[in-house]
Each structure stands twice: as structure tokens, then as C-alpha cells.
Amino acid sequence: MSKNILVAVAWPYASGSRHLGHIGGAYLPADIFARYHRVVGNNVLMVSGSDVHGTPITVRADAEGVEPIDIVNKYHNEFLGYWEKLGISWDNYTTTMTDTHIEVVHDIFNKLLEKGFIDKQKSLQAYDPGENKFLPDRYVEGTCPYCSYSEARGDQCDSCSKTLDPEELINPISKISGNKAEFKETEHFFLKLSLLEDQLASWLDEKEGWRPHVINWAKSFVKDGLQDRAITRDLDWGIEIPVDDLGSGKKIYVWFEAVIGYLSASKEWAKNKGNEKEWTEWWNNESAGTYYFIGKDNVPFHAVIWPSILLAYEGLNLPTNVPANQYILVKGEKASASRGVGKTLQEYLDEWNPDALRYALASALPEQSDTEISEDEMIRRNNEELVAAWGNLVQRVFTQIQNNFSKISEIDEADEVDKKLLKEMSESYDIVGQLIEKVELKAALQESMRYVSKVNGYLNETEPWKVIKEDEKRAGRILYTALEAIDSCANLLYPFMPSTSDLVRSAIPRETENLWGLNKIKTGVELKEIGLLFNKFD
């Protein structure tokens, strides 16, 4: 029976261009996972959108002398271009400024307030005296009190992953101006995480199959004791607070409302389809699977805080898994467009076949640890694995059939070597599928390419280019078997490289249409011309 699978993907700030770390961290893994589940017959809802309320947006707007909405529109449209070129198969990619999102945020805020999970508290908030403004946590920087990392943010240390409050930092400064941060008392609404500690700990104890760095961090965080956390801030740019208890100049803080976007995007998708209740099949249906694809810096919000909000609200599915990736490194540093570490995504898209770029990234996904990626290694993979192994396999089998038979020939009985290859190809679907379902995507790609190598090995063993001189029917059978195997390789590679896989599949005439299984190939018909799948880099 088909299952409902929610694929919820991190919301990128609409404040700047993306780089390979973003794509390899969340968006490509999510798309691979979603495409697989669609081809095996599951009902997938993949949602995300541009996060339009972060302070990085207002800072960039001030620097460029424009309004925040101008920055949002610029980068949101840039992101849409990325997704189209890379073939990221969203069911709904939206923003956090839609009417639906605001309605859903207000609904959750009001219900948690009514149930006593939100209250008003006074606290110290970082203030930039030179800019005359309060500073959101991520715009305070200083030395981490736990590990002495000198570039810790006011909400989290990227070195030791501890969550922080700005006043804990040693020598805190404003990232906007470089001024020393001061602290002033202000009143805000707080999410009372302390009331949810026991429930969350019990839920986490039940989780199996999560990546060690995710589940261990989440359990450790809860064991240390959950602290109430401010969900409003002194801001001009953000969602209005639905109750007027704090006075003017305050908005709902982005970290609280952005995670609610997964739910609001699902509801918006249902509205757009004309069936406003359809979202419930993924959010109220206990048999549905919900997977959150994020980078490791977002683990606190998706493995602790968002589940806490869902527990407090009640009636909505909690995450099945949070397969957070670690960082992609460039020359030992975390990839960062803003700091000039690595090229922008657009620069790569201008140079690379999108499927080749997807492949190079998928081969190095940082699933268990930070992973170094270099352009030399990416080019090697393109030239040796895509051009020389996969692309050349397709080309030489197509060429031999077209040159020697013009049409796919009628076939004799399969020999043992043919049966062995097809048996292995048939078994490959279970092996690769199980790896993808466990979100072991790098291993799934390696396994898929192993079958490409098997087909190349089969041709080298059977040598149809020699056999045809003495036994045309046997040569035809060998090439037919190779074509069946190529069709299966294209199926296996489809989640990773959809465009070129579709190109191969559309060129092969099939009697059956299994998207995740062996197909019987038609005989007596021509193959379509497809040309080179990939280009070699010098």
C-alpha cells in the first residue's frame, strides 16, 4: 500500500545567494528522497519556501539603501531559478509572508498562549548603542563560554553546537556595526519549553534510526534542562503579534514562525489544489512519515523546539526523522557565500550540467561528518564516473545496436551470464531502495553506480563487437540484455540525476513501464538518438 510522505525542507533566508553547502546540506538530499518515494508509488508532499523575516534581510536592505521587500523579491526569484535548473521537485515552494502563513502562525501562537505554554517575561536583550537598535540573537557575536570559539553567535555556537543566550557570550559585539553590545531589559513573550521537557524526553527516547549526531545532541540538550525561550523581538520587519500586550515595535521572532512554515506551506498547497483539508493526510494521519531535511546548525530548532511546539499544540504529527547533514567544507572551512568560501551556486550552474553537479554533490554528502569537497574531485567524478563509465556505456550500446541492427533485434534465450546480470539488476532495486529509505543517500548512489560497473563488466566479458562476426543472434541477445540493464540503471539513477535518466529512459522503447523495477524492452523498433549525456571537463 502507498504511504504518505511529508518532505519538509529548511527555509533559506532570502538575503543572499546560495552555495554548494546549502544544496548538499538540505535541498538535494530532500529531492533525491522525494523522487524515490514518488516512483515507488508513495504520496509525497515536499514543501519549503523563502524565509523573508530574518535580520540578514533588513541588514542587507539598509546596506543597499532599499526596502526589505526589494531584497526578498530579488533573492526569492533567484532561488526559484536555482530550483528549476537543478530540478528540485517542490510540491509547494512559497514564502513566510503569505496570508496562509500568517494565519497559521497566529493560530499556533494563540492556542499555545491559551494553554499556558506562552507567557510574558522580562529579559535582557542585546542593544547596539551606535545604531540605536536592539539586536536579534544572530547579530550578536562573541567568544563561546563553553569552548572558547571566537565567532559564536548569540543563539548558538557553531563549534560546540551549544545553544546560547547573547548575554552568555564573552566580549559580545554587534555584527552590524562592530560596536560593543550593551544589554537592556525588555519584555517579551516566551515559549515555556520547561513545561514540555518530560514529554519531549520520552518522545526522543522512542526514536530509532536517527543519525547519531542528531539524536545524541537532542537528548543531551533536553537532559541539560530546557529553558524558556523568547519568541518575540524588538523588530520592525516581521509578523505582527496577534495580541496587543507588549506595545509597539515588537514582532514575532523569525525562529518561532519559520518552523511553522512546514505546516502553513502544506495548508497553502491544499488550498491551491482546491481541497483545503487534504493537508491533514500528512499531518493528522498517524501512518504518514514526516522527514525534515536541514543542516546541522538547524538541529536545535527541528529536533527539540519544533517538536515541543507540536507537542504543546497537540494533534499534529511529530517528525519521523530529522536527517540533518553536517557541513560541506572548502579548503577546511565551512562553505559560505557571504565570507567568500567557495563559489556561488550560480557560478557552478553556469559551468556545469545540472545533473552532473547533482551527482558530484550527492557523491560527497556530509551525512555523518563534515566533508571536504574540491573542484578537482568534482571534475574527476564527472570525467571518470559520468562521462567514461555511465555516459560511455549508454553511447556504446546504443551505437552498436544502431550500427549493426538498425532496430532492436529479436532475441534468443538468455545464457547464464545474461540471467546473472538481470538477476543482480532486479535485486538492486531493493538494495538501493532500502538505503534511500534510511536516508543513506551517498551509499545508495555508490550502489547504483556499482551496477553501472557491472554492465560495463558484462560487455567486456561477452564482447558483442567480436561475437557479431560469428553469431549475430547471440550478439543481439547480449546487446538486448545490456539495454535492459541500462534501462534499470537509469531507473536507479533517476532520483539523483532526473534529467539525463529521463533522457535515457525515453529513448528505450519498453513493453512495460516500471519506474522502479526491470522492464521488458520492445524488439523490432528503433532506439531514439540521445547524443552525449555529459561533457568532459579539460
Image: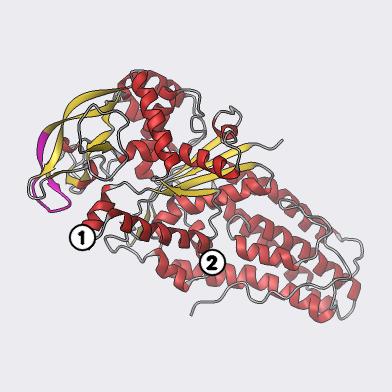
Given residues 475 and 313, the one toward you in this image is 313
**Where does the image place residue 11, in percent across and percent down from the top left?**
41, 47
**Where does the image place residue 41, in percent across and percent down from the top left?**
69, 44
Q: CA distance from mark 1 to mark 2?
A: 36 Å
Image quadrant where one finds the N terminus: top right
- As drawn, 171 above or below 380: above
**Residue 231 seen anywhere in this rendered image of the structure:** yes
Mark toward the viewer: 1 or 2 = 1
Circle on res. 356: 2
**Residue 375 seen anywhere in this rendered image of the structure:** no
The amino acid pointed to by label 2 is Ala
Circle on res. 63: 1
Circle on res. 81: none
**Where does the image place residue 123, in percent across and percent down from the top left?**
16, 29
Left or right of 317 on screen, residue 398: right
The amino acid pointed to by label 1 is Ala
- Determine the secondary structure under disc 1: helix
**Residue located at (26% from left, 40% from top):** 156
- As drawn, 233 above or below 180: above
Binning the other alpha carbons within 10 Å of mark 2 as few (below 14), some (14 to 19) or many (20 upward) gives many
Q: Which residues are magenta?
A: 173-184
Q: Quadrant of residue 59?
A: bottom left
Left or right of 316 on screen, residue 518: right
Colouring of the image: secondary structure
- Determine the secondary structure under disc 2: helix
- As drawn, 38 above or below 527: above
**Residue located at (58% from left, 33% from top):** 277
**Residue located at (73% from left, 54% from top):** 425
**Where does the image place residue 176, in percent across and percent down from the top left?**
17, 52
Given residues 119 and 10, the one toward you in this image is 119
Q: Quadrant of residue 303?
A: top left
